[in-house]
Amino acid sequence: MRSSSGEQPAQSLPAALRVAYHPFDRAGEAPAGVLAAIRFGAANSPPAGLTIDVGLEPLQASAATPGAELWFATGPVHTGQWSDSAAAGPGRVRYAHDDHYLFAVVELDEREHGGILLTAEYVYAAVRHFQQQSGFPHLLRMWNYMDAINEGSGDLERYRQFNVGRGRGLGDVIQSYPSATAIGRQRPNHVLQVFWLAGKVAGQSLENPRQVSAYHYPRVHGPVSPVFARALIAPDHTLLISGTASIVGHHSQHHDDAMEQLEETVRNLSSFAPHVRRPRTAAQGDLLKVYVRDPELTPRIAERLRQLYPTSAILFVAADICRRELLLEIEAISLAS
Ligand code: 3EB
């Protein structure tokens, strides 16, 4: 793997991304200069820039639990909505951007679009068309949240059907893949929710030497491979690590053992250590989002992660993982400055 250091002079870097978890006990505050607020649970932060409500419940809820993930703007924010003219209305994209970065979301009701496969195809066609005219052509980070991700068997499993639709909708226009997460919500609302960060400048996709690239998964994992990179270095050198689970090669490891899956996942995350730019202050530690299938496992997982990552902000949410034997998944952001 290449080191990310020393490739570009500092003045050519876009303004730095800043991301922080916003605790429930400050839910009444409206922080200034927010590009996008990804809100978890019920009582959460006021709307700002682009507001995205995800139907995932925070675990270990207390006053200090994050109710939102805030992506701060690097300058004045412009918000808007966009529809694919060929299909005005349902293809609606909501977005917010500053001079460097764009955040956008599409939310479609599966019942109105013929199920998960066709809805995914429709959403991703909208993503492609929107991106082509957005002025922010480079996809950096994507999240995909859906109902009942493990329902159905074999190639009819909903996650696999989602992959077929995503692949068809996106087509082959993408030069390099964004980092991504695909997760099942445990409280169904019929919505396929896809939101993303894009930039004017491309990032650098990374793969994990411990894992087969997802886009090269063999046929056994479904008819169409998931299209995402294991991680991406954003133009400002922020490291965006995709949802990472207990997979080595392309095989799930440690079926039914959450603590062993946690150790394997941590080893997978550690592959990216050479790309981490140490934050200037300890207060700007990394952000970890931990998706836990069985909420009762959270205290043990939390104890171990706080031991391993004492300076990181960690958010735990209840969620289903894209393979039924997987019990947890972790995504991470390592800020550049
Ligand atoms: C994996 O490594 C676990 O389909 O966009 C992680 C991150 C996973 C993103 C996606 C899926 C996706 O295959 C699942």
Image (cartoon, rainbow, N blue to C red):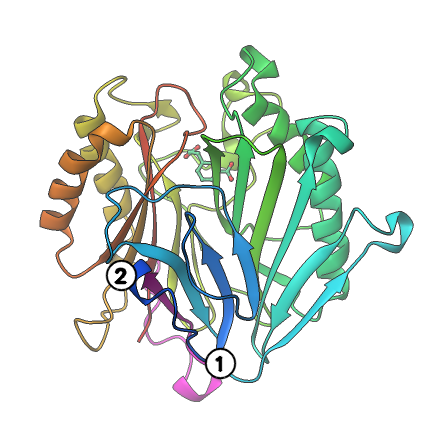
Look at the numbered discs 2 and 1 and tell me whether their residues touch, using CB distance below 8 Å. Answer: no
Kindly identify the residue that appears in the image at 45 percent across and 37 percent down.
Answer: 213
Q: What's drawn in magenta, residue-wise?
A: 1-23
Quadrant holding the C terminus: bottom left
Please state which of residues 263 and 45 is positioned toward the viewer in this rendering. Answer: 45
Residue 303 is covered by the magenta coloring: no
Label 1 crowd bin: few (<14), some (14–19), many (20+), radius 10 Å:
some
Residue at the limit of the structure toward the left, as seen here: 307
Task: Examine the structure image and report whether residue 20 is included in the region drawn in magenta.
Answer: yes
Assign the N terminus to one quadrant of the image.
Answer: bottom left
Front-most of residues 233 and 8 = 233
On screen, residue 203 above or below 229: below
Amino acid found under the numbered disc labelled 2: Asp
Q: Quadrant of residue 25?
A: bottom left
Q: Residue furthest right?
A: 86
Q: Is residue 152 rendered to the left or right of residue 61?
A: right
Q: Where residue 59 sits: x, y (%)?
A: 29, 41
Dot 1 amino acid type: Thr
Which mark, by number, is residue 74?
A: 1
Q: Residue at x 54, y 11 (%)?
A: 153
**Image coordinates for residue 147, horizontal then vertical, percent:** 54, 30
- The residue sitting at 51% across, 23% down in the picture is 218
**Main secondary-structure element of the magenta-colored stretch:** loop
Please name the residue that numbered disc 2 is placed on: 286
Secondary structure of residue under mark 1 = loop
